[in-house]
Image (cartoon, helix red, strand yellow):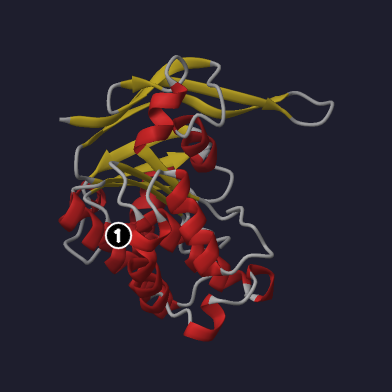
Amino acid sequence: MCALSCESLMKSFRKGKGKRVQALCGVGFFVRAGEIYGILGPNGSGKSTLVRILATLLLPDAGRAQVLGYDVVRQPRKVREVIHRVSTEAAFFKKLSPLENLLYGARLYGVPGRRVGRRARELLAVLGIPKDKQVRPMEQLSRGQQQKVAVARALLIPPPVLLLDEPTTGLDPRSKREVQELIRGLRKEAGTTVLLTTHDMEEADRLCDRVAILDEGRLVAEGTPDQLKDQVRSDGKPVSMEDVFFALTGKEWADEG
């Protein structure tokens, strides 16, 4: 079953008073139900634009995208009912605590706070938010801690489809691993389909069932991490995802995270 699909997506933006910049150039792919699908590319490659279109926050200039059979342009409300999104610019009520933000989010989905209070505390604890900081205003937390709260909020009520736009940016290596394990657990326990954008080569290699490489708005390759490595391997030596990116785009990898 196909959970996400894109066909010939196009999107451009006007940069100041200058010419239009093409963010997406005919992007097309599909994601199977229950799959963790990675979009790999450096900053500026079009990853966030793609996620924002799938989340109904941007309209494509051309092409088509569907989430669980719902068209993102013609049926945006239906799409929003089946997705959660985590991005690097997650919005919170800064005067409320992490716990209050999570419980408020649960109520927006029609789930009483008392039913999810325990899970909210467990998620925050697993992600390394101490009990005392769970009840402090969000504005008192570090940028990395706020990002952890954004992840916890998205995982609190398992969605059918989870859109993760560089969710581990700003996190230390241990916290990254914790988030990745939570994503795996969500897929295993709830069958959630995950679309993950990242500029972290190791994260894509470790976490994703399949990976698409986006370069300057164009999808230049797609496959499992092992398939992509086999595609560029020539002398039998070990190949990294960084080697794959260089071979398929002709560019050195620059991790701007």
Quadrant the C terminus occupies: bottom right
Which residue corresponds to the image point at 46% horizontal and 64% vertical from the top-left? 168
Q: Compared with residue 87, is residue 124 higher up or lower down, i.e. above or below?
A: below
Quadrant where the image shows the N terminus? top left
Relative to 114, say whether 36 is above or below.
above
Using the image as rendered, state which of residue 122 and residue 249 is in the foreground. Answer: 122
Number of numbered discs overlaid on the protein picture = 1
Q: Which residue is mark 1?
A: 183
Provide residue 209's location: percent of width, then percent of height. 21, 50
Q: Is residue 179 visible?
A: yes
Q: Position of residue 185 (x, y in %)?
A: 22, 62
Asked if residue 27 shows in the view, the reply is: no
Q: Amino acid at mark 1?
A: Ile
**Is 20 displayed left or right of 189 in the figure?**
right
Q: Secondary structure at mark 1?
A: helix
Please indicate whether residue 27 sits to the left or right of residue 237 in the image.
right
Which of 150/122 is in front? 122
Front residue of 173 and 158: 158
Residue 22: percent from left, percent from top: 60, 27
Q: Nearer the viewer, residue 133 or 72?
A: 133
Please give the name of the residue rendered at 51% of the width and 21% of the height, measured from the top-left corner: 10
| Point 38% across, 62% down: residue | 114
